[in-house]
Amino acid sequence: TMACMTAMDAAGNLNAFVHPTPEIALEQARAADARIQAGDAPAMCGIPLGIKDLFCTRGVPSQAASAILKGFRPEYESTVTAKLFEAGAVMLGKLNMDEFAMGSSNETSTYGNAVNPWRRGNDMTPLTPGGSSGGSAAAVAADLCLAATGTDTGGSIRQPAAFTGIVGLKPTYGRCSRWGIVAFASSLDQAGPMTKSVRDAAIMLGAMAGEDAKDSTSAPIEVPDFEAMLTGDIRGKTIGIPREYRMDGMPDEIEALWAEGRRMLEDAGAKIVDISLPHTKYALPAYYVIAPAEASSNLARYDGVRFGHRATLGQGDGITEMYEKTRAEGFGPEVQRRVMIGTYVLSAGFYDAYYNRARKVRALIKRDFDEAFAQGVDAILTPATPSAAFGLGEMADADPIQMYLNDVFTVTVNLAGLPGVSVPVGLDRQGLPLGLQLIGRPWEEGDLLNTAQVLE
Ligand code: GLN
């Protein structure tokens, strides 16, 4: 904990920790020491973590990187962070992210962007750590903490993990409680670990997971000892390579990395099969209808009364002006764009054409995966991202669709509710990390991580 706190002081320029909590860290670290001395050291005892700003942490600023939640200090603790603390973990502070987890570069944050500790060779251009869990990824990659929490609605754990050379796991939907995590798109959101190794991800997931009476979508499914499932033996496993993920214009480096991953799994005794997930091309448009629809509904609660910021009102301003001014000031441009798209696709005249259509597409995407698993596929190997980390400002200034295209390999997994893990597998020509994604059967994170370990 002390070493991490020193590193945090030295690394202010990464803008990863936005609310450091040194008092809490020292108190928790002392308590952890006492537990270790007493011979009662649970899995995460004394492990210093960073916590994404999307998690409500009692008495500590929890702003979802939004100006509208400025000054909000919840009186409650999210279930996931509470479980981590019960397991002995130490909180070093809250981590930067995209506003309300909407983005792929950490550039929509009210705190300004976090910075990727990696550089392209000798070129010092600052790069994005990815998003939305960009602060989490930067902090773990720069050794400011041993691991961090992330959340993933459409790739926000896996894409930043790939951009920073760390491991990021999105568990099966329902594996971790969403209670106390600021909601973005409730049917897609899932918390997960961002770690230095697959083994760490297994240990941390064990501490985060489990049914919770406060979240009816958390599943009454037993949490196994994930770490014990890391046998390293994947002989006889079947790995599917989906042909639809071979995109036009995909850089050869990504192609080569994918082939390399395939070889590594084959060498370890897995059987590789080509599979088809025919509805893949509709995933991105379906995601960018469903996620904003749910977001527009979830964000309706930021009304200037219940949480955080309220605009200064003028003479004669009524409740409507209060809502309008507060939301115009408090939400950044990307969040406003999502609210507008969401309310549009949910509006009476367009509901069937967009929202209902997207829901049907979602069911087809899920069926594609079900069919692959029914044919005996144990896990599916894909690239994690279509490129390595890009320069800050490079995409944000382009049109938003460019940014959305980053999520092309990750959103299918959220739409289908499956577990997916991004593992750092190699470097590109300029020395930047590249990741591969493995997608698993529902509730089989242990098996998935065991396969992922072969790629490490
Ligand atoms: N980049 C995606 C989006 O902006 C995914 C975000 C996420 O997973 N939270 O919606």
Image: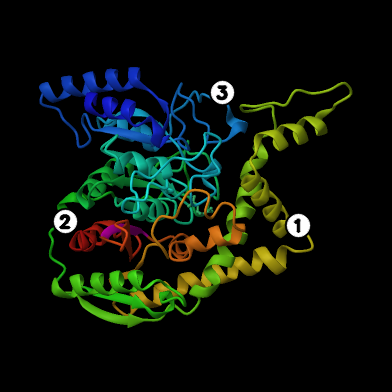
Magenta part, dominant SS: strand
Q: How many marks?
A: 3
The answer to whether 408 is drawn above or below residue 90 in the figure is below
**Snapshot quadrant of residue 381:** bottom left
Colour scheme of the picture: rainbow
Q: Which residue is mark 2?
A: 230
- Could you tell me how far apart the alpha carbons at marks 1 and 3 are, in whole angstroms? 33 Å
Residue at left offset 12%, top offset 59%: 231
Query: Earlier along the polypeptide chain: callout 1 or callout 2?
Result: 2
- Residue stretch rendered in magenta on the structure: 419-425
The amino acid on which the numbered mark 3 sits, given as a three-letter code, is Gly
Query: Earlier along the polypeptide chain: callout 1 or callout 3?
Result: 3
Q: Which residue is mark 3?
A: 71
Residue at left offset 79%, top offset 23%: 313
Q: Is residue 341 left or right of residue 280?
A: right
Instruction: Look at the numbered discs 1 and 2 and tell me whether their residues touch, using CB distance below 8 Å.
Output: no
Q: Which residue is mark 1?
A: 347
Crowding near the residue tagged with mark 1, few <14, some 14–19, many ≥20 C-alpha atoms within 10 Å: some
Residue at the extreme right of the image, as rendered: 316
